[in-house]
Amino acid sequence: MSDQKTLSLIKPDAVERNLVGKIIDIFETNGIVIEKIKKVHVSNEFAKKFYDVHKDKPFFKELCSYLSSGPIIAMVLKGENVIKKNRDLMGATNPKDAKEGTIRQKFAISIDKNSVHGSDSEENASKEISLFFS
Ligand code: UDP
Ligand code: MG
């Protein structure tokens, strides 16, 4: 099976608590390759573009101000079936529902400060990668 790519973000709450290395270690331990990586502090405008799929949700405004509240780590992850693999390693959106050993179960603070983002489909992965790395 050919390699896939996905966009991963380490969100402000995790960068702020010095969890970058621990999270990347989980990816590498699971055979995922960090193809690209950078630290960025995005604007609210950029966050709105990134989270456009959620523009009608009640939490949209807070979500965008949160993502732009501090530095984040943006990565292109590469590997076999990496979109699903990353989502499995991340765990459920709400850390209360996240399975034992997942990134969100271990590190997330709440449903909004949930430490990581991962693309959910090939289509969104390619859109999100272009937005961060072009
Ligand atoms: N989110 C939130 N409140 C909610 C649902 C989601 O603040 O009730 C935030 C949360 O940070 C989540 C992001 O919005 O990671 C995007 O939501 P999505 O449903 O796409 O979750 P994900 O794909 O990140 O698991
Ligand atoms: Mg999502």
Image (spheres, helix red, strand yellow):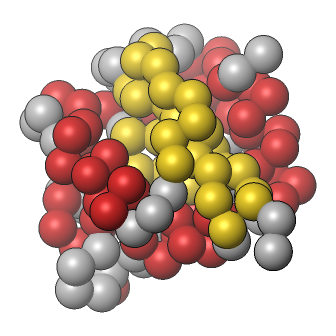
Which percent across, then down, holds residue 83? 66, 65
Which percent across, then down, holds residue 6? 67, 51
- Measured along the vertical axis of the image, is residue 63 above or below residue 107? above
Among all residues in the image, which is located at the extreme right? 123
**Quadrant assignment, res 119:** bottom right
- Measured along the vertical axis of the image, is residue 78 above or below residue 67? below
Left or right: residue 101 compared with residue 126: left
Determine the residue positioned at 32% across, 81% down. 98
**Quadrant assignment, res 28:** bottom left
**Quadrant assignment, res 73:** top left
Residue 5 in sight here: yes
Quadrant that contains the N terminus: bottom right
Left or right: residue 16 compared with residue 75: left
- Of 4 and 12, which appears nearest the observer? 4
Which percent across, then down, holds residue 24? 32, 46
- Measured along the vertical axis of the image, is residue 73 above or below residue 78? above
Among all residues in the image, which is located at the extreme left? 17
Left or right: residue 88 compared with residue 83: left
Determine the residue positioned at 23% across, 73% down. 105
Q: How many marks?
A: 0
Determine the residue positioned at 65% across, 16% down. 45
Residue 68 in sight here: no
Determine the residue positioned at 73% across, 35% down. 129
- Of 54 and 120, which appears nearest the observer? 120
Quadrant that contains the C terminus: top right
Left or right: residue 105 compared with residue 132: left
